[in-house]
């Protein structure tokens, strides 16, 4: 038996289109827009995952990622932005370790 999809085909195509067009626009945009576009995609994926996720994953999705702003890297407060993004990475890594560690 196959596992249920997190995204249906239409949602997956929407996310795919967003990622592909974001990659294209990134060619002509300033580099600081890259993290913004990736975080937008991460937020969209997390929103789609939430209703179908296990309770622990849903809690992880509602953690630091949900607090991450959907803005380009701020010029004046870059250090704080990077620290916050590092916190999102640590939080997700901790969840994955808990979920998949032997």
Image: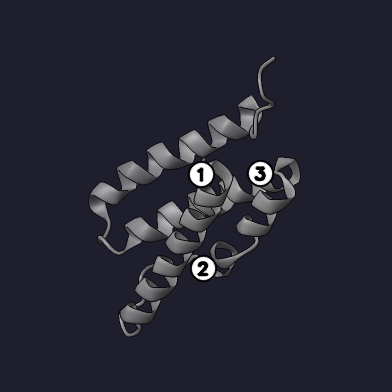
Comparing 57 with 70, the one in front is 57
Q: Left of 9 or right of it: where is 34?
A: left
Q: In this rendering, is residue 10 above or below 86?
A: above
Quarter placement of the N terminus = top right
Q: Quadrant of residue 8?
A: top right
Q: In this rendering, is residue 28 above or below 18?
A: below
Comparing 81 with 92, the one in front is 92
Comparing 45 with 74, the one in front is 45
| Numbered label attached to residue 68 | 2
The disc, 2 or 3, on the residue closer to the chain's N-terminal end is 3
Question: What is the CA distance from the residue labelled 1 to the residue labelled 3?
Answer: 25 Å
Give the residue pinned by disc 3.
Answer: 48
The chosen color scheme is one colour
Q: Left of 56 or right of it: where is 27?
A: left
Label 1 sits on a secondary structure element that is loop
Give the residue pinned by disc 1.
Answer: 101
Alpha-carbon neighbours of circle 2 within 10 Å: few (<14), some, or many (≥20)? some
Give the residue at x 65% y 34%: 6
Q: Nearer the viewer, mark 1 or mark 3?
A: 1
Label 3 sits on a secondary structure element that is helix
Give the residue at x 56% y 51%: 98
Q: Left of 75 or right of it: where is 90?
A: right
Q: Left of 27 or right of it: where is 50?
A: right
Label 2 sits on a secondary structure element that is loop
Q: How many marks?
A: 3
The disc, 2 or 1, on the residue closer to the chain's N-terminal end is 2
Question: What is the CA distance from the residue labelled 2 to the residue labelled 3?
Answer: 17 Å
**Place of residue 92 in the rendered image (x, y in percent of width and height, measured from the top left):** 50, 56
**Place of residue 24 in the rendered image (x, y in percent of width and height, measured from the top left):** 31, 42
The disc, 1 or 3, on the residue closer to the chain's N-terminal end is 3
Q: In this rendering, is residue 39 above or below 67?
A: above
């Amino acid at each position: 038996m196959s596992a249920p999809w997190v995204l249906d085909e239409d949602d997956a195509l929407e996310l795919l289109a967003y990622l592909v067009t974001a990659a294209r626009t990134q060619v002509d945009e300033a580099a600081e827009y890259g993290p913004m576009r990736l975080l937008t995609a991460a937020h969209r994926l997390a929103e789609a995952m939430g209703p179908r996720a296990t309770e622990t994953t849903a809690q992880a999705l509602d953690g630091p990622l949900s607090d991450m702003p959907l803005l380009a890297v701020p010029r004046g407060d870059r250090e704080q932005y990077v620290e916050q993004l590092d916190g999102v990475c640590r939080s997700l890594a901790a969840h994955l370790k808990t979920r998949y560690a032997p």
